[in-house]
Image: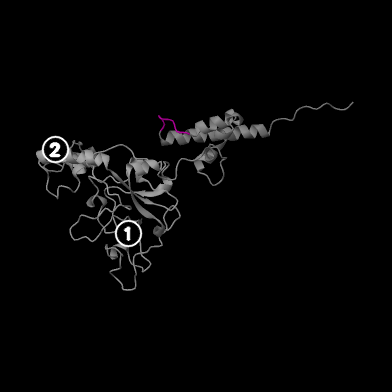
Amino acid sequence: MTGSSIPVSLFQGGLRCLPQRPLPTRISNSRFMQRIVGEDDGGKLFTPEEYEEYKRKVLPMRSENRLFVSWRSPTGMDCKLVGPETLCFCTHRYKQHKTDFRTIPQQRPLSLPCRVTGCQCGAYLYVPLNGAQPIRCRCKHFADQHSAAPGFICNACSKCSGFHSCFTCACGQPAYAHDTVVETKQERLAQGKPVGQDVPYAAMGGLTGFSSLAEGYMRLDDSGIGAPSVEVLDSPVTARDHPFLKAFQASSSSPETLTDVGTSSRVSSLRRPEEDDMAFFERRYQERIKMEKAAKLKGKAPLPPTTKPS
């Protein structure tokens, strides 16, 4: 298109063809600083001097007194590990609550009040989601239709005596049987649960790695369901297992029983790197024709000679 201001690359495969420019250093540093500072700057960007002073005061305290937050099942499994963006019952995020302490209070459970002006939340309380929306109370109203003040009275009706949901977690336990647990690094280590590495970022909660983003029943560390036992790993493959396991059952359970024909057929069913679609299907078709001809010849083979009785 001559004379147009639209780049020609837009018509040659879309936006992916445009050159990917790296972020400017100042933007990258600003994002890194925001992850460290969190909500402590009050929405006003720190000057370099204020930022250095903040790190000098806060980072050692954060490393020593980090708090781990999880939503725990009655079985002891952490069904949800809370991160900086995880919503509280008051609809504010975990990073908007008080998460840094110079001295950890002695009373238990630990309360992490919300720092948003006007919010009545006195302690961080995780509430699960049903898809993309909040779960419902037994009064049929959503969690965000209830007051964040202690008691959690419904704002949409007068018959509700407090938020109580029968929503069932993926672990099989109802939501009301779970607890939002706030614990120190030492308390978590005493239970054998992972604590990860010390990081300078604000409001990390219970996140210790990428596996922390999964639900508890999918997490194979000690904070989740745990690693499967040797008996489970060595158990025979059944009809309820994944099709991948059933397809390779013979090769994994008794490799000595595999014949050369079975192995070659499995290999031939795989596409070769240099093959396109038509070449792959043509090769598979010719192999099938050869197999059919071989089967017919085998069926018409002459009977072995027999000796006539004298």
Q: Secondary structure at mark 2?
A: helix
Q: Which mark is residue 52?
A: 2
Q: Secondary structure at mark 1?
A: strand
Give whichever of 268, 284 is nearer the camera. Answer: 268
Q: Residue at x 55, y 39 (%)?
A: 231
Which amino acid lies under the numbered mark 2 shown in the image of this protein? Glu
Residue 61 shows in the view: yes
Query: Which residue ends up furthest to the bottom in the rendered image?
Result: 158
Hey, what amino acid is under mark 1?
A: Gln
Instruction: Tell me, for residue 153, which label it has, or none.
Output: none
Residue 53 among those drawn in magenta: no
**Relative to residue 297, is residue 82 drawn left or right?**
left
For the residue carrying disc 1, how many other residues have a C-alpha within 10 Å: few (<14), some (14-19), or many (20+)? few
Residue placed furthest toward the right: 310
Residue 133 disc label = 1
Q: Which tag, 1 or 2, sits closer to the chain's start?
A: 2
Where residue 79 appears, as percent x and y from the top left, is 39, 50
Q: Considering depth in this image, is 282 or 205 the residue closer to the camera?
A: 205
- Counting from the top left corner in percent of width and height, residue 239 is at 56, 46
Cα separation, mark 1 vs mark 2, equals 40 Å
Give the quadrant of residue 295: top right
Apparent side of residue 306 relative to residue 82 in the rendered image (left or right): right
Secondary structure mostly seen in magenta is loop
Count of marks placed on residues: 2
Dot 2 crowding, Cα within 10 Å, few <14, some 14–19, many 20+: few
